[in-house]
Structure formats: structure tokens, C-alpha cells
Amino acid sequence: MPRIAVDAMGGDFAPEETVRAVAQVSLESDIEIVLVGNADRIQALLDGGPYNPELISVRHCSSAIGMAEDPRDALRAKRDASITVAARMVAAGEADAMVSAGNTGACVLAAAKHFKLIKGVRKAALASVFPRHTEYAGQDVLALLLDVGATIRCDALELAQFAVMGSAYARRISKIPSPHVGLLNMGAEETKGGEVLIDANRRLRGLPQIDFIGNIEGNDVATGKADVIVTEGLVGNIVLKLIEGIGEVAMDIASQAARESWRYRLGLLMLSTGIARMRELADYRTYGGAPVLGFENLCIKAHGRSNAPAIRNAIKVAAKAVRDRITTDIAEAVAQIR
Amino acid sequence: MTVKDKELQNEAGPTTAETPPAEPSAAEARPAALDHSAIVFRWDLDKTYLRTEFESFRKMVRIPFEAATDKVHLPGVPELIRALRRSAGERGVQPYVFFLSASPPQIGNAIREKLRLDGVDYEGIIFKDQLRNLIRGKWRSLREQVGYKLGELLASRLGGPAAGREVLFGDDWESDPLIYSLYADVLAGAISPELIGELLLLLDVERGQIARITSAATELGRSPTNVVERIYINLERRTPPKSFHVFGPRLVPAFNYFQTGASLYEAGLLDEAALPEIASALVEQAGYSAGRLRNSLDDLVRRGHLRTATRASIARILGHSGLVPRGRREVTLRARIAAFLERQRRRWLRVQPAELGPAIDYRSVILGWEARR
């Protein structure tokens, strides 16, 4: 059974929500969990609710990295931080994967410091799922976007590797037999974009192990055209935040309108089930976190504002990825493009 | 060993309240010397020994028709009881095992046969005569637990063969933690007969039962003895351990019988051979892994019910028997010295009377208990 190291102290609502999530997972699955953090606080929280102690162990560490701390400085100053200890445990084989809702930069840096890159992989990528329109029945309502912040700039080979890694992950986790892979660009034509994107498009077209559908534009991101969207970290991060922002603005506008007129209120009431569905789709808590792909070990980064259900999903995704041997799949796929 | 079955008829006593005998004066109430030559283990049956399923009506009606072979014990319990008897014998202490069940005597044969199949010897088993309650129209008595169990416990102590220390085993389904704590405090003289009567009224116990209990409490109060060493509550429902903090350190909530065994080993009531026996039962009957056994131990340490040195000692014992791989923590010089010192401590261990923690505020415990129910 998979053994997952969970950073108990990372996240806006840690350790309460993290410990609650772990307790829940311990009662409903056979996943072994190591809670990394302040043992006294963790045990006090465990004591307050139902849990299965046989599946939970605690690794005490004295410090934690705050959400607003500079990741590089914090990792240097706090060698015993929960996020670092969790990464070290995974690297040493004491756990199969790690999950953290803590500081994203510190999470990626800790993974980069302690995990080895898969042979041939030049850069790791932080992938994120987001809701999108579906084009056919049975299509996953979530698409994968990578990289969303582990890198800033990438070359063509690195983008090709991201495509292969994302495709392997989507095949296993989203259960799409042959995910459609798109390269985010400013036009659909192969000659659009700069030198890097033109070269990346050429490389991707030559990869038989992925179903490359060509370039996709910004307006296609939220359609069901591509299951995996590849881009460099700078652009990916902007796109992700834009999607989150649009969702929040739409909800704000609707509630503002409802406050102003009873007609809007009535209209919204009639649309309530649709709105609830939209909310559910846009709810990051249901996604189960974002994987950092490219390392020999797996790290799942849950949203900083994650509550217990979100962290619970992240732990389950990590366990599934371990069971399905995602990293081995990725290593085999990457080996073919060298 | 001859098995003497005792099936009490659950005399609820007169329905009108009797005046309880006068409370003994301070001069009369002299603490009795603790009898170290005997030890009594009192066990609840359903959900503590047996995996009885009465969550639904369908499951409940099946129970009377179950044969001994249909009944399933919780992993590690028969091994634990056998080890408790053996360990006591090795120390020259006479063990007594009593079962107290709220099940009717009509299923007694199946239960006695089950215990025989499990190789569990016992000195007594008490059933609740539900048929008599039914015939007499005592509907409340059918479900009532506190009065019935507390009354039987006190009667058993008064009329029982032993005056030794006691260890009690129950579960988190009904009111075992409350009943056992009340019983322990009545024996220790920490609750007066007047107070027990008042508490039982709060719990809506029948007046006849109250009279019977206060009478027994008065009798036992003449020579109060702090005899209850530990109360083990099997967390079959995974009730949060924090819920039991109100009962003080005497009560140990345990998630499995390996945890219970570890705590009993620390108390000097189990020998070294017992822990691998219980752990093996959990591995074979419930698919426990080495990791799950280790986690169970660590959980007990974190909750303050097991000392770190004892944990190391147990890990070493399990390591020797091949049940868990010997970790680095167990083979370091420091760990080995700690294990050696622990062995010496156990060699000279004279089990002390149970420590009385801070007095339990039963009135607020009962109000909270009733609110939860």
C-alpha cells in the first residue's frame, strides 16, 4: 500500500484541516500516511476526532515555512521545516510521495533539492488541473496545464518533455486513453510564435507516443479541444490565475446584481442548479492538487487555501499516482524522445 | 480448570425505592489491604470480545440463531485472555476471568461453546434475563445498561471468590466507560452511596436497581480499596480518544488488542511472550502489517499511555520474533541500554494499586454523556 508523507504544517488552514483530512483518509482507505510536523499539536488534533492510528505515523519537526516567506531564504534558514523533512523522507525511500498545501515555491524548491530528475528530463514542471467545457460525452471535465510556475522560460525540448509527462499523467489519473495535447500559442498555424514555439511544434508533431493536436490559442484553453496544454511556466501561471480570477469575478457580478434587483435574484434562483454546478467545477477543492512532474519521486501540491476535503483528494491522487507507477511511465515516455 | 457458570436472573429488586442502609462513618470505613494473591479480569462480551453486529434490526434478529462457529471474536482477544491467565500464574497470582453480558441467557450455550473453541477459561459469565424483563413488562430494563451492569459488578465483587485487584475491559458502544469508572470509584470509596444514588437517578435507573446498588456500595464502602488497576475501552466505533479524558488516566482507550496488550505489559500484567502472540493473531486474523503494529505502539506513546522505554522494549521483542523488522531506533546503544533498564524495572516491578487521578466530576460527565446519546 502507498505511503504518503503529508506536510501537516503547510497551508492557510494547517495543521487543523490537514490533520482532519488525514484522519478521514485513514478511516476510508488503506493508504499509510506520515504526518510531518509538530507531534504534540498533531496528536492533540487527532485525539479530537475519529481516526485509524494503524495507518498514521507522525514525524516530529520543529519548524514550518509560512505561506508568505521567501522560499529560498526560508529553506536555507529552516532545515527542519516540515516541507523539507517530508521531501527528505520521500527521497530516502521512507515514503512513496509527498503532499503539501504549503508555500508553493518552497514545495517546488524542496522537491528540486532532494529529488532526482528522471533520467533525460531537463526541467521539472508544475502541472495544474482546471475546469473546462467538454466536447463529447465522457470527456474529463478537467484539463491539465503545465508548466504553471516551476520554470520561467523553456526551450523546445523542455516543452516537448512537458507534453510527454503531462500526457502520461492524464492517461493514468484522468483515465483518458489518448489525451489530446495542445501547445499554447498565439495562433493555430505551425509558423506562429517565436523560434522556441515553432521548434517545439515541429518536435511535438514528430512524437508518436502523444496525440498532438497542434497549437491552441488562448480562447481554446477552456474548450474541450485539448486535454493537456503545454506552455512555459511564466505564461502557464498567468493563464491559471486568469482562469481563477474570471470565475471569482463572474460570481461577484452575479451576487452584486442579485443585491440590486429582485428580477436578477429571481433569475439567479432559476439558474441556481446551473450555478451550483459551475461553482463545483470551479472549486479547486475537488481537484486533488497539482503534481510536480519530472522527478523520480512524486510531489502533489495542494492549493494553499485547501480545506480537509481538498487535502483528502490530494492524498488520494498521490496514492493513485504511486499505485499506477506514474514516474515509471513518465521515465519510459521521456526515454523515447531523447 | 473447572468452569463455574453463573447465570444471574437479574433481580431488579422492588420497584419502590428502599431506604439504603446508613453510610458508614469515617471511623468504620477503613481502607482494606490489597490482596496481591488474586487478580480479577472482567470482560464485556459484545463488541469487546465478540464482533457482534447489532447495528441493524436484521443483524440483531440473527444473533439468537447463531451457532458458536458463526460467532467471531475480535482479533487478539482470546490470545490476550490466555496470556493474562498464564502471566498471572507465573507470578503466583490466582487469575479470575468473568464475563458480563447484556445478552439474554438463551444464547448462553453458543457463547460458552465459542469460548471453549477459543480456548478461553473463565470463572463466571452473567447474562441479562431479558425474557423476564419482557414478561414483567419492564420495557425500560430491556435497554437499560448502567443499573444492570453496575449492580452485577458490585454483586459479583461482594459475593465473588476473590478480593484481588481488577482490570476491566469494555467498549465504546454503550456506557462501559461510565459504568466501569463508577464501579472503580465506589470500590475505592471515592463515591459515597448517597452520591451514587443521586447519579443513578440522573441516569434514569430504576429505583429498585438504585436501592440494590446503594446497598452494595454501602457494604463495600466499609472497607474501601482502590482495586481497579486499569479500565480498557476498545474503540470499536473509533470514538475520539479525547472523549474519554474526563475519566482520568485509569481509563485507557485502545484501538486494537495489541495496544491493550502493550499497556498491560507495561503494567507488569503480561509476560514477554504475550505480545508476539497477540501481534501474530492480528497479523493472521486481520492482515496487520509490521507498519500497522509499529504505528499502533507509537499512537499509544503519543497519547501518553505508554512510556518510550516500554515502546523500545516491545519493538525489540517483536523484532526478535520476526514480526517487525528491527529498526535503527531499536539497535542503537541508547535504545539497548533503555531496553535493558526496562527489563530490570519489570523484574523488580511490584504492581502498585491503581493511582487515583483527580476526582471525576460525574455530574457533568453524565450530563455530557446523556447529551451525546
Image (tube, coloured by chain):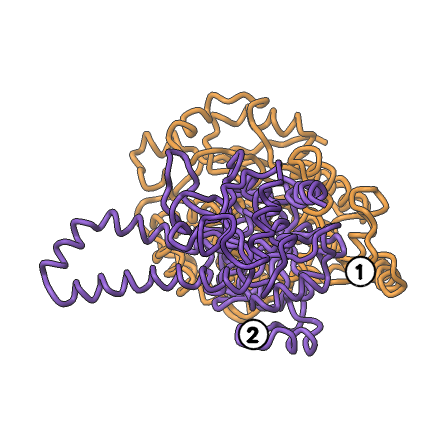
The picture places residue B2, in percent across and down from the top left corner, at 69, 30
Question: Which chain is in orange here?
Answer: B
Q: Position of residue A301 (x, y in %)?
A: 56, 58
Mark 1: which secondary structure? Answer: loop
Judge if badges 2 and 1 mark residues of a common chain: no
User: Mark 2 belongs to which subunit?
Assistant: A
Q: Residue at x 20, y 67 (%)?
A: A256
Q: Quadrant of residue A325?
A: top right
Say which residue appears at 69% left-offset and 52% top-offset.
A297
B202 and B7: which is toward the camera: B202
Q: Which mark is residue A66?
A: 2
Residue B349: numbered disc: 1
Q: Nearer the viewer, residue A102 or B250?
A: A102
Residue A46, position in %: x, y?
Answer: 54, 59
For residue A219, above or below residue A41: above
Q: Nearer the viewer, mark 2 or mark 1?
A: 2
Q: State the image quarter where residue B48 is shown.
A: top right
In the figure, what tint was chain A given?
Answer: purple
The N terminus of chain A lies in which quarter of the figure? Answer: top right
User: In the rendering, which numbered label is found on residue B84?
Assistant: none
